[in-house]
Image: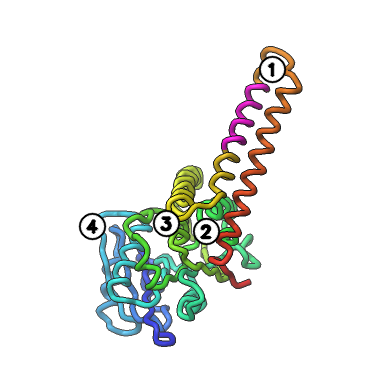
């Protein structure tokens, strides 16, 4: 415990026989329970976790085994359910691949323990040597997805949306509909959207990126289109739920008309360009009309974003 708070750590694992014991054996002593959730591994991950559990030395351990592979988000949700059932005050997540420093776990959980936040996440992107440590394509992909997640979730000052090193309070776990959370790679992004709906206070702390030469199975050419669609749906759902159904806010008009005008202006501009190439000159009035729609649309979108930032500024904080 820390300050009388029970700390659980969910460890999602899939084919992590090389790392799972290292993760379990290096957990800090203040952890009350490690919940290993195996997502139908094909190696000896489960066997090794069971051996650690039977030793009864160090941190206590529970094991949840999925009968089929359901995705990293689903494994975290299984761990969250167990922590919620057993009334753990704080539930952290540490991946089974050893890419999260156990020495930083206290940094992750303390804002929740002290009631400064209800959800804490690490931020690797502000580390001094991140450009040298993190693979370049992952850094760029992460930065792009973080930008989209800012817009979708309403946590505009958030960075490193893809980090899985997090901690969450029991109070906010009891408010979330865990079954609605995205089951696969987009889980960290989706939960931020859902947290904003329940006015969850989010805090971000700097952590060290760790890779140790491990190869990722994530292909950005597939992930980014999938994630973009997921975040677009999340953004529209947040607008409808938070700013139309629960309470009305004029920012929905700015977003709607801004997006409409911008798209119309772009489409009309493309039409004029094709006409100019194939048929001949276009009138200056038509070109100005297209430009007016684009500029008006962008201006309206920026106003909508500004309103969104103001409405959510009290829900996010970070350590520098």
| Relative vertical location of residue 202 with respect to residue 261 in this rendering, above or below | below
Label 1 vs label 4: CA separation? 59 Å
In the visual, does 128 lie left or right of 57? Answer: right
The residue carrying mark 4 is 67
The residue carrying mark 2 is 161
Q: Cβ–Cβ below 8 Å for labels 3 and 1?
A: no
Label 3 vs label 1: CA separation? 46 Å
Magenta span covers which residues? 260-272
Task: Give the secondary structure at mark 1.
Answer: helix
Q: Residue at x 56, y 49 (%)?
A: 250
In the visual, does 86 lie left or right of 242? Answer: left
The residue carrying mark 1 is 277
The residue carrying mark 3 is 187
Of mark 3 and mark 1, the one earlier in the sequence is: 3
Q: Residue at x 74, y 23 (%)?
A: 285
Q: Quadrant of the C terminus?
A: bottom right
Residue 274 among those drawn in magenta? no
Q: Nearer the viewer's eye, disc 2 or disc 4?
A: 2
Of mark 2 and mark 3, the one earlier in the sequence is: 2
Of mark 1 and mark 4, the one earlier in the sequence is: 4
């Amino acid at each position: 415990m820390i300050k009388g708070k029970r700390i659980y750590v969910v460890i999602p694992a899939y084919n992590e026989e090389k790392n799972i014991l290292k993760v379990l054996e290096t957990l800090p002593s203040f952890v009350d329970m490690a919940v290993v959730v195996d997502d139908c591994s094909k190696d000896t991950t489960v066997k090794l976790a069971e051996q650690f559990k039977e030793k009864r030395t160090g941190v206590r351990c529970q094991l949840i085994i999925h009968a089929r592979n359901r995705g990293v988000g689903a494994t975290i949700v299984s761990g969250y359910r167990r922590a919620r059932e057993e009334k753990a005050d704080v539930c952290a997540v540490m991946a089974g691949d050893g890419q999260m420093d156990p020495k930083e776990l206290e940094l992750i959980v303390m804002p929740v323990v002290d009631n400064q936040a209800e959800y804490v996440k690490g931020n690797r992107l502000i580390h001094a040597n991140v450009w040298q440590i993190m693979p370049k394509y992952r850094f760029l992909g992460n930065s792009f997805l973080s930008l989209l997640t800012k817009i979708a979730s309403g946590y505009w000052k958030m960075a490193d949306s893809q980090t899985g090193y997090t901690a969450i309070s029991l109070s906010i776990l009891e408010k979330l509909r865990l079954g609605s959370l995205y089951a696969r790679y987009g889980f960290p992004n989706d939960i931020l959207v859902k947290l904003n709906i329940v006015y969850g206070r989010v805090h971000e702390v700097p952590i060290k990126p760790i890779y140790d030469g491990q190869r990722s199975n994530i292909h950005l050419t597939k992930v980014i289109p999938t994630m973009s669609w997921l975040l677009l749906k999340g953004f529209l759902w947040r607008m409808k739920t938070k700013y139309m159904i629960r309470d009305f806010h004029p920012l929905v008009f700015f977003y709607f008309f801004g997006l409409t005008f911008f798209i119309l202006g772009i489409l009309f501009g493309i039409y004029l360009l094709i006409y100019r190439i194939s048929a001949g000159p276009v009138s200056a009035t038509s070109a100005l009309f297209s430009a007016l729609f684009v500029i008006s649309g962008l201006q309206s979108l920026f106003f909508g974003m500004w309103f969104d930032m103001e409405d959510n500024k009290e829900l996010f904080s970070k350590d520098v």
